[in-house]
Amino acid sequence: MSLPSHVTIVEVGPRDGLQNEKQAVDTAVKVELIHRLQAAGLKEIEATSFVSPKWVPQMADNAAVMAGITRQSGVRYSVLTPNLKGWEAAAVTRPDEIVVFGAASEAFSQKNINCSIAESIERFAPVVDAARAAGVKVRGAISCAVGCPYEGEIAPERVALVARLMAQIGVQHVGVADTIGVGTPLKVQRALEAALQHYPLHEVSGHFHDTYGMALANVHASLQLGIRTFDTSVSGLGGCPYAKGATGNVATEDVVYLLHGLGIDTGIDLDALIDAGQFIRGALGQPNGSRVARALLARRAA
Ligand code: HMG
Ligand code: MG
C-alpha cells in the first residue's frame, strides 16, 4: 500500500504526558502548553482527563484546564472519561471528543480502571450513548494491545475482541495502544489488523510509548498498513501511572520529522513545536526527550 499523503497527529502531551508527573504542574502552565501546541499547528489535542483525583492527582484541575483554553477554530479538544461521573464532569466543559479507555489485558484493566474488560464495556456504553447524543465524538483506547506489564505478550485476538465490543457499543474510533512500549513492527501490525477487522482504516490510530525505542519503527510499520492517525507527546513526555516502568509516548517532534522526511504533510511547524517542547520541559526542569528536538536545538545554537 502507498503511504498516506496526510497524517493527523493527536497531541497527547497535556494528558498522557503530564498525568504521570509527580511534581505539581500549574494549571496555567498546562494551558500555556496547549496554546503553544495549537499555535504550532496541532489540530487534535488531548487536553486532560476526568478520572478520579485519588487515582491520578495530576489531572485534578481538569475543569480549570478546559476553562483556561482559548479555543482556536479548527482545533479539536479531547478528554478522557472512564465512566458516567467522568462524562458528566467533562460535558459541561464542552470537549469535542471523549476517550473511553479499556484494555486488551484483564490484569491491566483491573489495575488501571478497577474493573474487568466486560465491566468496562458496560460502564462505557452509557457514556458513549450520552456523548453521541450530545454530538461529541467517541474514541476508544485499547491499552496493552501487544504486551502487558502483568500478563506479558497479548495475542491479536484479544485486541480484536475489545475492538468488536467497542464497535458494538458505538465507539467511533479505536486507538491501538502499546502502553509499555514493548511492541515491534510485525506485532504492532498484527494488533492493528485485529482492530481493522471491526473499524475502517481512517478510524484506527496508533498510540505508541517508546520504552524500548521501537515507537518510530512502529509508526512506520503502521503507515505501511495505511494507518494515518497517531497519538504522540511533545518532547516525549509521559507514561501511565498504572504501567510501571513505561516511559513517554513517542515524541511528536520525532514523528513529525519522520513524516515530513517521507513527504507526508502534517500541517505542523516543527520549529514552533520544538519551542513548545522546550517550554514544558523548562517548566518541569527536565531535559527534552525528543532526539529530533535535541539535534535541531544544537544546530540552532551552533
Ligand atoms: P473506582 O474506585 O472503582 O470508582 O475507580 P468508584 O466508582 O468505586 O468510585 C470511587 C470514588 O471515586 C468515589 O468517590 C467516586 O465519586 C470517585 P468517594 O465517594 O470515594 O469520594 N470517582 C470519580 N471522581 C472523579 N471523576 C471520576 C470518578 N469516578 C469515580 N470519573 C475509576 C474507577 C475509573 C474512577 C478509577 O480507576 C480511575 O480514575 N482510573 C483512571 C486511571 C487513569 O487515569 N489512568 C491513566 C489513563 S489511561 C492511559 O494512560 C492509557 C492510554 O494512554 C493508552 C495507553 O497508553 O495504553 C489512554
Ligand atoms: Mg498512553
Image (cartoon, helix red, strand yellow):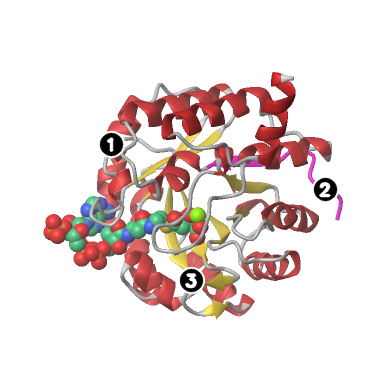
Q: Main secondary structure of the magenta part?
A: loop
Disc 3 to disc 2: CB gap under 8 Å: no
Image point 61% across, 28% down: which residue? 273
> What residue did someone put label 2 on?
3
Q: Quadrant of the C terminus?
A: top right
Q: Earlier in the sequence, mark 1 or mark 3?
A: 1
> What residue did someone put label 3 on?
165
Q: Quadrant of the N terminus?
A: bottom right
Residues drawn in magenta:
1-11
How far is the residue under mark 1 from the one under mark 3?
30 Å
How far is the residue under mark 3 from the one under mark 2?
29 Å
Estimate how packed mark 2 is, as few (under 14), some (14 to 19) or many (20 or more) residues with alpha carbons within 10 Å.
Answer: some
> Of all residues shown, which one is farthest toward the right?
2
Q: Earlier in the sequence, mark 3 or mark 2?
A: 2
Q: Is residue 8 magenta?
A: yes
Q: Residue 247: give its label.
A: none
